[in-house]
Every structure is written in C-alpha cells, then in structure tokens.
Image (spheres, grey):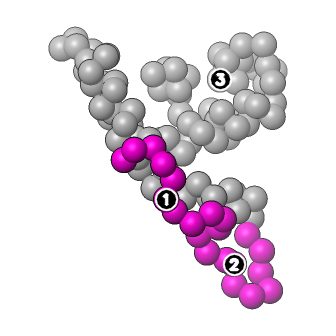
C-alpha cells in the first residue's frame, strides 16, 4: 500500500448490450465498492484514535454511510446554500435525498 494505483483504468464492467446505466450506475463503475470499504476502514481507525472517549465512544461508519456521505457532498456541490445546516433544517429548502441519507450530526461527525 504505497499509494500507487495498480488497477486497470476505466469502468469495471460494461452494461448489457443495448442498455445504459443510470448516472449513479455509471458513477459507481469508476469508484467501485472497494473505495467506500477502504474509506470506512480508514475513517474508523482515525476516528477511534482521535475522538473516542468513555462518555462519547465513536460509532463506526460503514461503507454504505461513506457512500451516502459522498452523495450528500455531491448534491451540496450542485445545490449551494449559505450554511450546511440549511440542507436539514430550513423549511424553505426541500432536500429529502440529503435529509433521508443521514442526520446533520452524523454528517458532521
């Protein structure tokens, strides 16, 4: 693990003949689930070292949560608001995809 990429570039697989992937499907072909698994593993290692206390133990993140967090980041880049809390708390902002992905506190953790 010296930081050098050794995989093949491009999609991991191709859609069946005559079909197309959704935008999310295409996106996932370039990232792949291994990225989220490794990001979760490293996040948990770092968080345990920095954040864990007896009164406030670190709640491990999963690869699925890392994927949701990345999706929230992506949507925040598309739909820009003055503060992060607005995506969850503003009655004028309707972002069910973000609200449904995770709580504001979990996002900030």
Q: Residue at x 71, y 17 (%)?
A: 86
Q: Is disc 2 surrounded by few (<14), some (14 to 19) or many (20+) residues within 10 Å?
A: few
Q: Is residue 84 above or below residue 44?
A: above
Q: Nearer the viewer, mark 1 or mark 2?
A: 1
Instruction: Judge the density around disc 3: few (<14), some (14-19), many (≥20) Cα neighbours within 10 Å.
Output: some
Q: Which residue is mark 3?
A: 88
**In the image, which is nearer the foreground, mark 2 or mark 3?**
2
Looking at marks 2 and 3 on the same chain, the residue that comes earlier in the sequence is marked by 2
Q: Secondary structure at mark 2?
A: loop
Q: Is residue 94 visible?
A: no
**Disc 2 designates what residue?**
15
Find disc 1 in the rendering and name its residue. Answer: 6
* Residue at mark 3 to residue at mark 1: CA–CA distance: 39 Å
Q: Quadrant of the C terminus?
A: top left
Where residue 29 appears, as percent x and y from the top left, is: 63, 63
How far apart are the two marked residues, 1 and 2, measured between alpha carbons? 24 Å
Question: For the residues marked 2 and 3, what is the alpha-carbon distance in whole angstroms?
Answer: 35 Å
Give the residue at x 63% y 58%: 30
Q: Which residues are magenta?
A: 1-21
């Amino acid at each position: 693990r010296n930081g050098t990429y050794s995989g093949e570039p491009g999609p991991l697989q191709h859609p069946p003949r005559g079909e197309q992937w959704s935008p999310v499907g295409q996106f996932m072909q370039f990232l792949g689930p291994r990225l989220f698994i490794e990001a979760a593993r490293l996040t948990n290692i770092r968080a345990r070292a920095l954040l864990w206390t007896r009164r406030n133990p670190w709640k491990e993140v999963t690869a699925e949560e890392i994927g949701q967090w990345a999706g929230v980041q992506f949507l925040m880049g598309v739909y820009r608001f003055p503060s992060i809390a607005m995506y969850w708390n503003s009655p004028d902002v309707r972002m069910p995809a973000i609200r449904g992905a995770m709580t504001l506190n979990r996002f900030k953790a």
